[in-house]
Amino acid sequence: MKDSNHDKAEGTLDKAKGKVKEGFGKLTGDEEAEAEGKNQNTKGHLKETKGKVKDTVKSGTK
């Protein structure tokens, strides 16, 4: 299983990529790219949350 820092880093990267893709889609009128960007941004938020939950569980078990 990946550690919490890895999940949080992946989440941050996914959010950044999603924002760029979403912005590109808005700028060019490409609704598909915009939707993909929004989905990737959401995926990033979920990964970050997963990492934070792992931290919470880990600190609660000590």
Image (tube, rainbow, N blue to C red):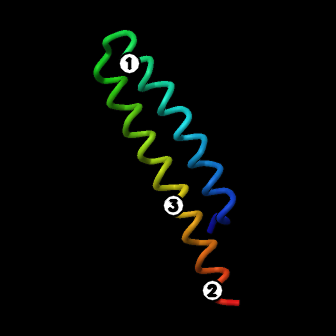
In the rendered structure, find residue 25 and report the number of the disc placed on it: 1
Specify the quadrant of the image occupied by residue 58. bottom right
Disc with the residue nearer the chain's start (3 vs 1): 1
Task: State whether residue 4 is above or below residue 6.
Answer: below
Disc with the residue nearer the chain's start (1 vs 2): 1
Task: State whether residue 27 is above or below residue 19.
Answer: above
Task: State whether residue 10 is above or below residue 55.
Answer: above
Residue count near mark 3 (Cα–Cα under 10 Å), binned few <14, some 14–19, many ≥20: some
Q: CA distance from mark 3 to mark 2?
A: 16 Å
Residue count near mark 1 (Cα–Cα under 10 Å), binned few <14, some 14–19, many ≥20: some
- Residue in view at x 62 percent, y 55 percent: 8
Instruction: Name the amino acid, label 3.
Output: Thr
Task: State whether residue 2 is above or below residue 56.
Answer: above
- Residue in view at x 55 percent, y 56 percent: 48
| Residue 54 horizontal/vertical position (percent) | 59, 72
On the rendered structure, is 24 left or right of 58? left
Q: Residue furthest left?
A: 31
- Residue in view at x 71 percent, y 90 percent: 62
Specify the quadrant of the image occupied by residue 1. bottom right
In the rendered structure, find residue 49 and report the number of the disc placed on it: 3
| Residue 4 horizontal/vertical position (percent) | 65, 64
Q: CA distance from mark 3 to mark 1?
A: 26 Å
- Residue in view at x 41 percent, y 26 percent: 22
Question: How many marks overall?
Answer: 3
| Whether label 3 touches label 2, CB < 8 Å | no
Mark 2, secondary structure of its residue: helix
Q: Residue furthest top?
A: 28
Mark 1, secondary structure of its residue: helix
| Residue tagged 2 | 60
On the rendered structure, is 17 left or right of 23? right
Instruction: Name the amino acid, label 1.
Output: Gly
